Image (tube, rainbow, N blue to C red):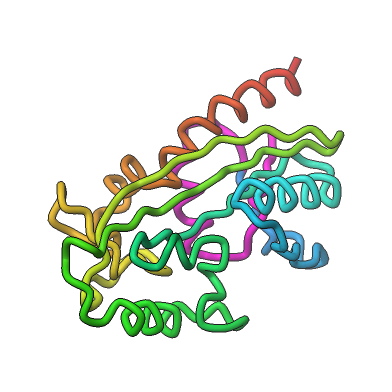
Amino acid sequence: MEIVLATRNSGKVKEFKALLASLGVTVLSLEDYQWVPEVEEDGSTFKENAEKKALVVARATGKIAVADDSGLEVDFLGGAPGVHSARFAGPERDDGANNRKLLQLMEGVPPEQRSARFCCVVAVGTPEGKVHTAMGTCPGVILQKPAGEGGFGYDPLFFIPEYGQTFAQLELNVKNKISHRGKAFALAANIITQLVNVAEI
């Protein structure tokens, strides 16, 4: 059984493959389907964007497709950047620029007001047009400067007090257990397993 991850983000592909390794499925990505165009994320919620991507890619490839939409919600910024996390500093999806903009907006904000959370919605779509979703969140704090070389996106600024490290410092297996994406995928894995089992009957 092959499933397609509706992304070309190498960081996400690496995490997704680790999260899905136990399911015994072949994990492909949009790198394997260069002719499938980028899906415009024009929804107002993570759920809308994830569902749209999963369904478009499932129909285009004829395979079960898994998509996520995730982002950072900073309380001091009223929940921003939210669904605009990837393009916070512009359409180029530049992680460094996004982090610099976040730090500028949070300059001088005291530690007790730097609470935030990562949110993730995973959608599992079928070529027949059915879609199922799962959601996960992970609370943390925005640091005043980056720490760590791992991960991607806002990981170097997202500090987990219980572990004393940022997402960029945590081992991948630890991050996958506690992260928003890990929690959402743990729920979505059950959905994927059921769909794979039905397809094999």
Tell me the magenta residue range.
Answer: 1-26
Classify the position of the C terminus by image quarter.
top right
* Residue 105 percent across, percent down from the top left: 35, 80
* Residue 196 percent across, percent down from the top left: 67, 26
| Position above or below: 200 against 93 | above
Q: Locate residue 121: give its quadrant.
A: top right
Q: Locate residue 166: give its quadrant.
A: bottom left
Check if residue 25 falls in the magenta segment: yes
Classify the position of the N terminus by image quarter.
top right
* Residue 182 percent across, percent down from the top left: 42, 42
Check if residue 63 falls in the magenta segment: no
| Position above or below: 100 against 149 | below
**Residue drawn at (31%, 49%) of the image:** 139
* Residue 33 percent across, percent down from the top left: 76, 60
Side of 52 relative to 76 (left or right):
right
**Residue drawn at (42%, 59%) of the image:** 73
| Position above or below: 78 against 184 | below
Q: Nearer the viewer, residue 111 or 93?
A: 111
- What is the count of numbered marks? 0
